[in-house]
Image (cartoon, rainbow, N blue to C red):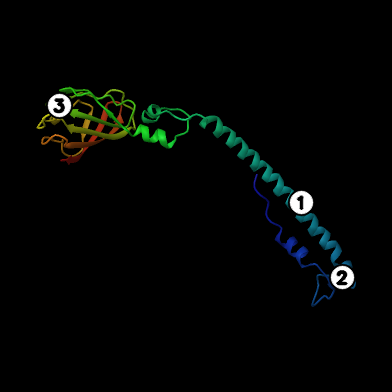
Amino acid sequence: MAFPATPSADIAILAALNGGAYDAGSNPSGLGEGGHRTNFVPAMGSTADVANWIAAVITEMLVVAAAVDADAASAAAGSGTEISAANLANLANVAHFVSGRRYASANAFTTQTFNATQTWNMNDTFNHQVTLTANMTSVSNPTNKVVGKSGILVFIMGGSGGYTIPVKASWGSDYRWFGDVPTMGGATGSMCMISYLVKGSSEVWLSWGGNYT
């Protein structure tokens, strides 16, 4: 249902009516001096048209109000629960509302436990970091991948420094490198940043963002 067209002509007729003396040339809408006999019937017709239009508008507004109420009730039913940071980071299919604090928690860095043959559990947050305490010789395919998830992986130089991260051939088969495979060395506290996107169930795109020393 749509709002009815405004009866502009009828509104104009009613708006022009006045109590002045009727004159066909200078004041055709006057009701005085016999003007009511000329204008009464047309005015009643316009009044009826405008009244019917108002009634139709009110009916449409009630329909819209009912739809708004239904939408609000539906939204309240689906968004009455705050999403957890883990569900947000894992792109869970739940009808919960996203709060600022949950968004911030989901973007916090999860620390991965260092291993020379590094594993990567993508669960719980978007961003991850690992501190090298020795040379890292390989990185296995990540676990708990969710298609569409993206974030940052950061390698941090720890210990006495000078450790290395794996060459391309020593990364798992799921990884697809865009551009150069990163290298790392240098002083304790230096960092290497890698952006990732889970493109498919067995496909993780990686892009080296550079090193910070």
Q: x, y (%) of residue 33?
A: 90, 73
User: Of discs 3 and 1, which sits in the foreground?
Assistant: 3
For the residue carrying disc 1, how many other residues have a C-alpha within 10 Å: few (<14), some (14-19), or many (20+)?
some
Q: In the rendered structure, which disc, 3 or 2, sits on the residue that comes first in sequence?
A: 2
Q: Give the residue type that dot 2 points to.
A: Gly
Q: Secondary structure at mark 1?
A: helix
Q: Which residue is painted at 47% across and 33% down in the image?
A: 97
Q: Which residue is painted at 51% across and 32% down in the image?
A: 79
Residue under numbered circle 1: 52
Q: CA distance from mark 3 to mark 1?
A: 82 Å
Q: Give the residue type that dot 1 points to.
A: Asn
Nearest the viewer among 143 and 113 is 113
Q: Is residue 154 left or right of residue 72?
A: left
Q: Quadrant location of the C terminus?
A: top left
Nearest the viewer among 187 and 63 is 187
Q: Which residue is painted at 27% across and 26% down in the image?
A: 202
> Quick check: marks 3 and 2 in contact, CB under 8 Å?
no
Q: In the rendered structure, which disc, 3 or 1, sits on the residue that comes first in sequence?
A: 1
Residue under numbered circle 3: 133
Residue under numbered circle 2: 35
Q: x, y (%) of residue 156?
A: 19, 33
Q: CA distance from mark 2 to mark 1?
A: 26 Å
Q: Quadrant location of the N terminus?
A: top right
Image mark for residue 64: none
Q: Which residue is painted at 81% across and 58% down in the image?
A: 45
> Quick check: marks 2 and 1 in contact, CB under 8 Å?
no
Q: Give the residue type that dot 3 points to.
A: Thr
Q: Is residue 173 left or right of residue 197?
A: left
